[in-house]
Image: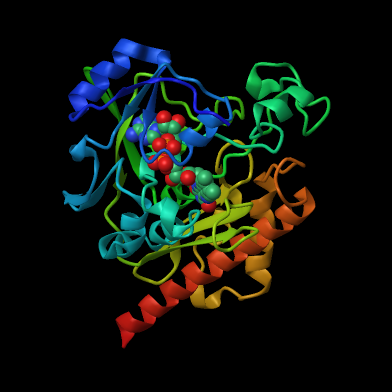
Amino acid sequence: MNMPRFEFLNPTTVKDALSLMSEHGKNLRVLAGGTEIFGRMKHGLVSPAYVMSLKGVKALAGIKERKGALVVGAATTLSEIAESRVIADFAESVSEAAGLVAAPAIRNVATLAGNLLQDSRCLFYNQSELARKGFGPCYKLGGGICHAVKGSKRCLSVYQGDLAPALIAVGAQVKIQKTGLSRTVPIEDLFSGKGKNPVGLAREELLTEVILPVRKARSASAYQKLRVRGSIDYPLASAAVFVSAGKDGAIEDARIILGAAGAAPKVAKEAAGAILGKKPRDIDQDMDLQQIALLAVKAVEVVENLALAPSYRRKMAAVMTKRALERALESLRQAEHAGHA
Ligand SMILES: Cc1cc2nc3c(=O)[nH]c(=O)nc-3n(C[C@H](O)[C@H](O)[C@H](O)COP(=O)(O)OP(=O)(O)OC[C@H]3O[C@@H](n4cnc5c(N)ncnc54)[C@H](O)[C@@H]3O)c2cc1C
């Protein structure tokens, strides 16, 4: 696998980065940690004429508080996020998810934006050029078939990012900039839901910040992930849960987000709604949560295109959901107990 030739660009300010992006448009690819994009370039899945590194743009890295919210620079590394006390205080699910991505050597260079904006994956797509030639071009490669499900009318590749479900659960937003324009949107709006082009960011747009909202007084979140090798792998099923309670202890807000569940993280609204109005100590540890988890995984779309069998991944999505719910509710109970002590 050879790296294709490209011209390397190394801006030092956001302004310069944006102007290079508008100048080169679809011929340019942003390089953050490179742990995803370089693999795709070596496989011949993308061959940009220009690669623009964000390493020199110091303004894009770091964690700071602004008006009570937490602003995390797009180029902040996952190690920094996983080890940050302040991130854990704002959102346990986010530091847990960051600490479970790949392995330490990857987390030391991989960035937050790179993690969010990674492409969807499929056993028939993430292959060498030679192997792909044997299969023939699928939807994701511009062809008209899906090798995973014969007769499918669309690409069924899977978005396997760990951070997106955890960030969506706590209501985080992203700031996106292009020359002369800036917009801030909820993280779920980044995703198109289409396997062919899962991330809805225009070529000249740069993700510059992730904003974690002010933490609610009685709230908790948790993240759970299934992978083949605990030391390195992508999620094959994951769940992020956020819960918050009112002064009377009843749950007034809940979110359940499933990862590795289709082309985008899935928001399980109906399942989350089932615990609203209940007190954490009243929710039966086995029955209620099992039913809620089974309701949540109705949204999961799994086919034969990742490492484990779809039926097993679906079952484990429910297990991950139940465990994440248990942990988030337990944190709420403990917080309530500490408040009364
Ligand atoms: C062995 C291995 C295991 C992995 N395991 C996991 C895992 O468990 N969980 C997981 O979530 N991921 C995993 N990954 C994927 C990847 O390493 C991580 O998602 C990582 O966080 C990507 O970050 P990066 O900074 O290296 O991204 P890059 O490779 O630099 O970029 C990824 C994409 O984002 C774009 N991009 C980056 N920054 C910006 C920006 N600011 N604005 C606009 N576009 C931008 C790039 O152009 C590219 O398309 C794994 C990768 C490998 C090689």
**Is residue 192 at least partly visible in the picture?**
no
Residue at the (49%, 28%) spot, across then down: 3
Q: Position of residue 116 (x, y in %)?
A: 44, 40
Q: Position of residue 200 (x, y in %)?
A: 47, 26
Q: Which quadrant, please, contains the C terminus?
A: bottom left
Q: Answer left or right for 305 relative to 93.
A: right
Residue at the (43%, 60%) spot, across then down: 99
Q: Position of residue 232 (x, y in %)?
A: 54, 57
Q: Answer left or right for 244 relative to 263.
A: left
Farthest residue, direction right: 150
Q: Quadrant of residue 211?
A: top left
Residue at the (35%, 67%) spot, across then down: 218
Q: Position of residue 227 (x, y in %)?
A: 62, 58
Vertical order, 192 against 181 (above or below): below
Q: Which quadrant, please, contains the N terminus?
A: top right
Q: Answer left or right for 38 relative to 159.
A: left
Vertical order, 132 against 70 (above or below): above
Front residue (pair 132, 24)? 132
Vertical order, 328 against 4 (above or below): below
Farthest residue, direction top: 23
Number of labels in the image equals: 0
Front residue (pair 334, 236)? 236
Farthest residue, direction bottom: 341
Front residue (pair 253, 101)? 101
**Is residue 139 at least partly visible in the picture?**
yes
* Quarter, ligand 1: top left
- Colour scheme of the picture: rainbow
Q: Answer left or right for 333 relative to 178.
A: right
Vertical order, 192 against 84 (above or below): above
Residue at the (63%, 35%) spot, across then down: 126
